[in-house]
Image (cartoon, rainbow, N blue to C red):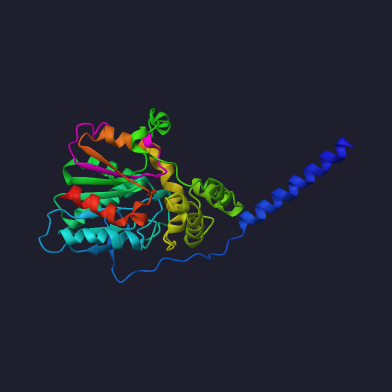
């Protein structure tokens, strides 16, 4: 009897394995929206080899000397039209505003060699953009991973940064011995921070799809078994799940515009360990920093607090009843907080 049960289990597992491999090998249908160029879309061909899509809103009236550059989240995120609508209003105060899709995402080009996707590549692209703008200094607005990127850039370009605004910034890269402890650090009760809607179950179910597992597995070794379009489609489909946890009220989540960069999202995190630590370089920095955090932000408090500890000339603003993507639910308060800081 036991032998018979073992035989049944053996054949069952073999059949399941075959089904898994078949699903993993068959390309999936790309049924998500694909982001389309806007009337405002322009392109830079950077010396790094990156073709970067961007939107430029010229400052009005009394022009300010330093432009604002927006760094979106991800890696593999993109500039949503709502961000352009909200942050573009900084131009009313005289600021030139640039919002660009990082390489491998949005309307920017995809790299044939996916091993070239790295945090360092993103930093070098930003340095090349600042060089193109011929700006003496810049003001960086970093959202989520964009906050990590802004920090990496500032560490190596202290004399090029006038101010930094970090909105729900991701963790400082690379992780260090304290990173795990910081994630467990409890926020002061006075801040009234809350946990966002839990969307982990929906996201994990999607991540475990056989085809997506195969794409990520081979990408780890630098191999593309799927087209950029298919890899992007998976990230865009997954975004429809996890973005519900990036707002206070899930009914307010914005429709995805289809700009996710699949391979960029998979490969860049694997490059963090190769980064030099920016913390020591920023220890004596006097760059003015504003950190804006949603009350329901999904980034652990300890990771946010590390920015306050690193940047001595920093201030914190908590936006009530807002999640990780503050600009969606509280665009006016989000914008006004920035304007006050920049004045």
Residue in the image at 24% along x and 39% along y: 315
Q: Quadrant of residue 3?
A: top right
Q: Nearer the viewer, residue 244 or 205?
A: 244
Q: Quadrant of residue 184?
A: top left
Side (left or right) of 268 relative to 335? right
In-image side of 173 versus 283 (left or right) = right
Residue 53 to residue 8: above or below: below
Which quadrant of the figure contains the N terminus? top right
Q: Which stretch did the figure color magenta?
A: 279-302
Q: Main secondary structure of the magenta part?
A: loop
- Place residue 43 in its image quadrant: bottom left
User: Residue placed farthest to the bottom in the image?
Assistant: 39
- Total numbered badges shown on the rendered structure: 0
Q: Is residue 291 visible?
A: yes
Q: Is residue 10 left or right of residue 41?
A: right
Q: Position of residue 300 (x, y in %)?
A: 40, 38
x, y percent for residue 322: 37, 49
Residue found at the very far left of the displayed protein: 62
Q: Nearer the viewer, residue 20 or 179?
A: 179
Does residue 330 show up magenta in the picture? no
Q: Tell me which residue sits at (23%, 42%) in the image.
A: 289
User: Within the magenta stretch, is there residue 291?
Assistant: yes
Residue 69, given in percent of the width and then of the height, sits at 24, 54
**Between 107 and 239, which is closer to the camera in this rendering?**
239
Residue 275 in view, yes or no: no
Q: Residue at x 43, y 50 (%)?
A: 246
């Amino acid at each position: 009897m036991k032998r018979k049960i073992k035989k049944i289990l053996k054949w069952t597992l073999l059949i399941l394995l075959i089904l898994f491999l078949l699903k993993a090998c068959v390309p999936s249908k790309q049924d998500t929206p694909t982001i389309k160029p806007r009337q405002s879309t322009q392109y830079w061909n950077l010396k790094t080899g990156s073709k970067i899509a961007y939107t430029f809103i010229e400052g009005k009236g009394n022009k300010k000397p330093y432009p604002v550059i927006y760094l979106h989240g991800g890696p593999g995120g993109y500039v949503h039209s709502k961000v352009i609508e909200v942050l573009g209003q900084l131009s009313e105060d005289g600021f030139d505003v640039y919002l660009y899709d990082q390489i491998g995402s949005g309307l920017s080009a995809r790299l044939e060699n996916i091993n070239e996707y790295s945090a360092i590549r993103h930093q070098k692209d930003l340095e090349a953009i600042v060089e193109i703008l011929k700006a003496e200094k810049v003001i960086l607005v970093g959202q989520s991973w964009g906050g990590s990127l802004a920090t990496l850039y500032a560490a190596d370009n202290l004399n090029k940064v006038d101010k930094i605004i970090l909105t729900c910034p991701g963790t400082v890269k690379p992780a260090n011995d304290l990173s795990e402890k910081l994630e467990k650090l409890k926020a002061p009760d006075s801040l009234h921070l809350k946990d966002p809607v839990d969307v982990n179950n929906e996201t994990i179910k999607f991540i475990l799809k056989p085809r997506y597992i195969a794409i990520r597995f081979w990408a780890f070794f630098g191999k593309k078994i799927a087209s950029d379009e298919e890899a992007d489609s998976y990230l865009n489909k997954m975004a429809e799940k996890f973005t519900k946890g990036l707002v206070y009220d899930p009914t307010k989540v914005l429709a995805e515009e289809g700009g996710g960069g699949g391979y960029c999202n998979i490969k860049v995190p694997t490059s963090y360990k190769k980064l030099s630590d920016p913390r020591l370089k920023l220890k004596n920095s006097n760059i003015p920093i504003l950190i804006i955090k949603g009350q329901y932000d999904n980034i652990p408090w300890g990771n946010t607090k590390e920015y306050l500890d690193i940047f001595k000339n920093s201030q914190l603003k908590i936006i009530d009843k807002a999640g990780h993507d503050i600009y969606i639910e509280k665009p006016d308060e989000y914008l006004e907080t920035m304007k006050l800081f920049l004045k």
